[in-house]
Amino acid sequence: MSVFSHPEFDQHEQLNFFSDKATGLKAIIAVHNTNRGPALGGCRMWNYASDEDALRDVLRLSKGMTYKSALANLGLGGGKSVIIGDPRQHKSEALLEAMGRFLNMMGDRYIAAEDSGTSVADLTVMGRHTRNVAGITERTGIDGQPCNGDPSPATAYGTFVGLRAAVKHRLGRDDLRGLKVAVQGVGNVGYRLAQHLAAAGAELYVTDIHQDQVQRAVEQLGATAVSAEQILALDVDVLAPCALGAILNDISIPQIKARVIAGASNNQLAAPHHDAMLRQQGILYTPDYAINAGGIIDIYYERVGHDHQRVLAHIESIGDTLNEIFQRADASDRPTGEVANELAEERFLKPEAVVV
């Protein structure tokens, strides 16, 4: 299939394929749009079922980063990179160094950060060969404590802020005590989100492809473990997808009983029409790239000058952005994702717009 006729291709500015025989590295880097600044997006390592799956993921994710940065009003564009392979089996220092060299070949057009399957330590290794990695500088975290650069705490906190706003709008509740929340995926971000929810008194149901992560949530947060097949159809108040994307589709949506969907994973909608399908079913969908922008906000300030209070205030403004989306959607009887896209496009298609 030609890249230009690929269903996920959306006027991407650049797409690069890299391979390194010595280390087994196979990677793709996509730059979607740089009107507002250099493209920034995570470097994901995943054991994709096919090269086509990897290409689809990098095209969708890079576009999502453009919309995320624009909606968060940051001076960044959107990009993404994927490494094809199992991070628990195929990752090596040599492979990461090779990825760093490929990142350097991109010049200043793309900046990589941590993502599923990669860590601060991994990005630090890549950084031996390029300056274009982010989220590796030690600084004050959103909790006021020292942070090694990992954006996961900021992503999780921003998702928690957005979830509260969605619950307030749809369920009319300020208090989360007793709220039933199904968290799909309790990795770096999902577990931290679960911690915030547990502290607020929510009742948690969790699943993950890694059983040790599920067990941690059960033992430390009092969560109830459920199977991956059960999680989407649970009789809960909120569904929080925090794993891979495309889980909201023709098959899953009719089964969902939650009245709010608010989670950290990217590209939750399998196709654009699922946005309207959720609204028709009476489910408030919290656009993923709006709610999960905390991490990229944190990384942005790392590059332009980090101020703890300013970062925290910017992340907490995610709730205000979502309230605007919810209100516009209700006023015009349109899906929330459509409204969020409209707001983002107003910003990145007009690069002269005000940038923080």
Image: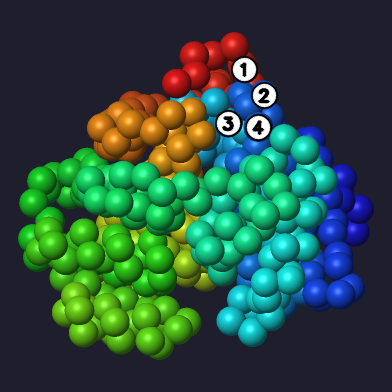
Residue at the spot 47% in from the left edge and 41% down from the top edge = 299
Residue at the spot of label 2: 35
Amino acid on which disc 2 is placed: Asn
Residue at the spot of label 4: 38
3 and 2 marks in contact (CB < 8 Å): no
Residue at the spot of label 3: 76
Mark found first going from the N terminus, 3 or 4: 4
Secondary structure under the numbered disc 2 in the rendered image: loop
Which of label 4 and label 1 is nearer to you?
4
Marks 2/4: CA–CA distance: 8 Å
Q: Is 289 left or right of 26, judged from the image as shown?
A: left
3 and 1 marks in contact (CB < 8 Å): no
Mark found first going from the N terminus, 3 or 1: 3
Marks 3/4: CA–CA distance: 5 Å
Mark found first going from the N terminus, 4 or 1: 4
- Please state the horizontal and vertical placement of residue 59, each as a whole percent of the image: 71, 50
- Please state the horizontal and vertical placement of residue 141, each as a whole percent of the image: 31, 47
Residue at the spot of label 1: 351
Secondary structure under the numbered disc 4 in the rendered image: loop
Which of label 2 and label 4 is nearer to you?
4
Q: Is residue 287 visible?
A: no
Mark found first going from the N terminus, 3 or 2: 2
Quarter holding the C terminus? top left
Amino acid on which disc 1 is placed: Pro
1 and 2 marks in contact (CB < 8 Å): yes
Q: Is 48 left or right of 73, judged from the image as shown?
A: right
Residue at the spot 73% in from the left edge and 71% down from the top edge = 94
How packed mark 3 is, by other alpha carbons closer than 10 Å (few <14, some 14-19, many 20 or more), is: many
Residue at the spot 26% in from the left edge and 66% down from the top edge = 194
Secondary structure under the numbered disc 3 in the rendered image: loop
How packed mark 1 is, by other alpha carbons closer than 10 Å (few <14, some 14-19, many 20 or more), is: some
3 and 4 marks in contact (CB < 8 Å): yes
